[in-house]
Every structure is written in C-alpha cells, then in structure tokens.
Image: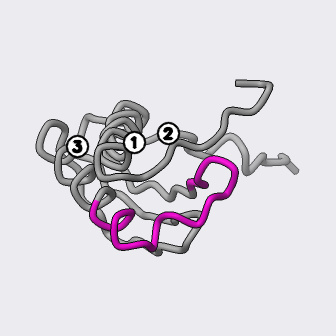
Amino acid sequence: MEERSTLANYLRSRHGATYFFTLVTANRRPILTTRLGRRCLREAFSVARHSRPFEVLAIVLLPDHLHTIWELPLGDADYSTRWRHIKTEFTRRWISGGGREAEKSNSR
C-alpha cells in the first residue's frame, strides 16, 4: 500500500489568495483604538489600497494589535509592500497628528 504525504499538496502561497495577518504595535503600545490611532490607520489603509488594490474582508482592532483578512487581486501576492506602505503612512500621520514615537529598543 502506498503512503501519501499530506504536505505534498499543501499550498504555501497562492497568488490572488486570501491572507490572515496579526500585527502588534511597537512595545505593545495601546494606540490603535485611540481616536488618532483609528484615523491614522483608516487613512493609511485608504492610501495603500489606492496605490496597490486589495480587499479587506475583516479586521479586528484592539488597543495594541490588530487581526485582518485580506484578499489580493489575482496574480498578486505582494502583501509585504502593502504592509510597508500602511506602516509608513500610519507612522507619518501619527507623528504629524501629535502622537509620540515609541522608544527604540537596543536591538533597533
């Protein structure tokens, strides 16, 4: 009898697929559910979606982290560029809106 491996059929990446992400703020600062944090995040997502489209199927926003499910366009698996854009926009808007930068750890 032939033994079959379930790992052989496992897809690690699919272009145009649905992805689940969890992101945590620097030093787990509880900033995401503040009025400024929500505004900065909403605007950062909007800017990123304009330049590189994707669908937000779900998002759970907690003070120090978020969970989100995205669907990327067919033929596109570049979620890392989108996250980089969102993080950069969020930080720029956070600081210009009066938010303080987190202290950098020794490793940074």
Instruction: Name the one closer to the observer, 94 or 53.
Output: 94
Q: Quadrant of residue 48?
A: top left
Q: Picture coordinates of residue 92 (x, y %)? A: 33, 39
Spot occupied by residue 41 in the image (x, y as percentages of width and height): 33, 58
Could you tell me which secondary element the residue under label 3 belongs to?
helix
Q: Please give the residue where the numbered disc 2 appears in the rendered image.
A: 13
Q: Do the CB atoms of the residues marked 3 and 1 lie less than 8 Å apart?
A: no
Q: How many marks?
A: 3
Seen at 14% across and 37% down, the residue is 51
User: Could you tell me the amino acid type at mark 3?
Assistant: Ala
- Three-letter residue code for mark 1: Thr
User: What's the magenta region?
Assistant: 23-39
Give the colour scheme shown.
Answer: one colour
Residue 32, placed above or below residue 80: below
User: What amino acid is found at the position of numbered circle 2 in the picture?
Assistant: Ser
Q: Nearer the viewer, residue 98 or 94?
A: 98
Q: Are marks 2 and 3 in contact (CB under 8 Å)?
A: no
Q: Label 1 vs label 2: CA separation?
A: 29 Å
Q: Residue lying furthest front in this view? A: 98
Alpha-carbon span between mark 3 and mark 1: 13 Å
